Image (cartoon, rainbow, N blue to C red):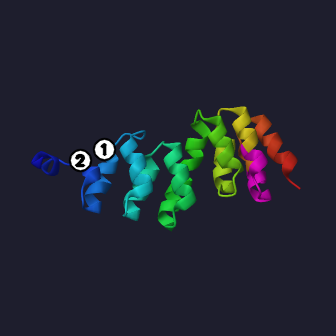
Amino acid sequence: MITKYLFRPLHEHADPAQRLQGVAALAPDAPELAHLVTTDPAADVRAAAAARSTDLGALASAWRTEADAGVRAALGGVLGRVLASTTDAAVAADLLQGDACTDAIRAEVARGATDAERRRIAVAAVRSAEVLVDIALAADHAETRLAAAERVH
């Protein structure tokens, strides 16, 4: 029992600075990391965990509820990459089409997804003409550039 307190993993430490160090030791797909994204009381720890996590469920949940601007910035930075690469097409489509998703996240998916249907969904959900122009000019895939250009008014 005492060894539990003496040899506690850093991500479970009472001190946020220690938990922050523990985040770096966890694998991107670790359930403990996903748990820190949504529940840690320290914003710095949540932001660091979000930046490393690949757990789409935890990231999406945190995106819907997070109030801290720094954590939201970290979440926004990673959500596009994770949405572009996830194998769960239904969840990705739902998030991309939802009101909570930003055009910056959609644009990252439109530029970075290997799945043509995912790129199409992302482009169709973009609301800003400026973002559509950016995708039309800079996307790697011709069909993505064309889809964005067709939506520009």
- Find residue 5 and report its horizontal and vertical position in percent: 15, 51
Q: Can residue 85 be seen in this view?
A: yes
Left or right of residue 153, residue 83 in this image: left
**Considering the numbered disc 1 on the image, is that residue within a helix, a strand or a loop?**
helix
Mark 2 Cα within 10 Å, few/some/many (few <14, many 20+)? few
- Three-letter amino acid code at the position of disc 1: Ala
Question: Would you name the residue on which mark 2 appears?
Answer: 9
Residue 15: name its quadrant: bottom left
Kindly indicate whether the residue at mark 2 contacts the one at mark 1 (C-beta within 8 angstroms).
Answer: yes
- Find residue 38 and report its horizontal and vertical position in percent: 45, 55
Question: Would you name the residue on which mark 1 appears?
Answer: 25
Mark 1 Cα within 10 Å, few/some/many (few <14, many 20+)? few
Residue 41: name its quadrant: bottom left
Task: Specify the segment rendered in magenta.
Answer: 122-134
At x 71% / y 39%, what residue is drawn?
A: 119
At x 74% / y 48%, what residue is drawn?
A: 135
Nearer-N-terminus badge (1/2): 2
